[in-house]
Amino acid sequence: MIQVKPINMDGQSVIGIEVKLPKTNLLAIATEKGYIMCGALDVGLLNEKLANRQIIAGRAVGVRTLEELLNAPLESVTHEAEALGIYKGMIGSQALQKML
């Protein structure tokens, strides 16, 4: 099952996406500039092989819901996210604020 839902962040809408798969959930919350995602995100791939795309993204591990993703510290972030002031350890909702 796939669930897409708007999430209000200080009057602006971001999009939460949850894909329920056997034994796991894929979670992502996206703005127009970038996104945060569960542990399935390969930040190394984005930084190395896809660097020319300049993707702004962060990864949180151990999250099972969109709410947990919003409240979790980011385990890793892309170089482009760092350029926006997003850093490892920053809470997901704070990172999304910088992506608005």
Image: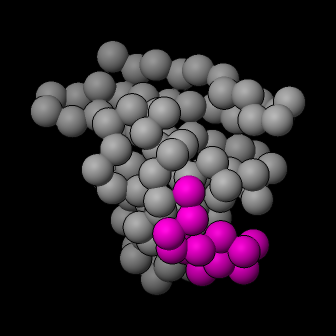
Q: Is residue 85 magenta?
A: yes
Foreground residue, 9 or 56? 9
In this image, 34 relative to 23: left or right?
Answer: right
Q: Going by the image, does 66 lie left or right of 56?
A: left
94 relative to 13, above or below: below
Which residue corresponds to the image point at 29% horizontal and 50% vertical from the top-left? 62
**Rendered view: 85 above or below 13:** below
Along the viewing direction, whichever of 82 and 42 lies nearer the viewer: 82
Give the magenta-colored segment's residue range.
77-91
Residue at screen point 65% across, 70% down: 86
Q: Position of residue 35 (x, y in %)?
A: 60, 51
Q: Quadrant of residue 30?
A: top right
User: Who's the residue at 45% across and 79% down the image?
Assistant: 49
User: Where does the image place residue 44, in percent across and percent down from the top left?
Assistant: 40, 76
Q: Quadrant of residue 70?
A: top right
Residue 37 image point, x, y percent: 46, 50
Identify which residue, 65 or 2, lies in the foreground: 65
Residue 52 visible in the current orientation: no
Q: Residue at x 72, y 74 (%)?
A: 85
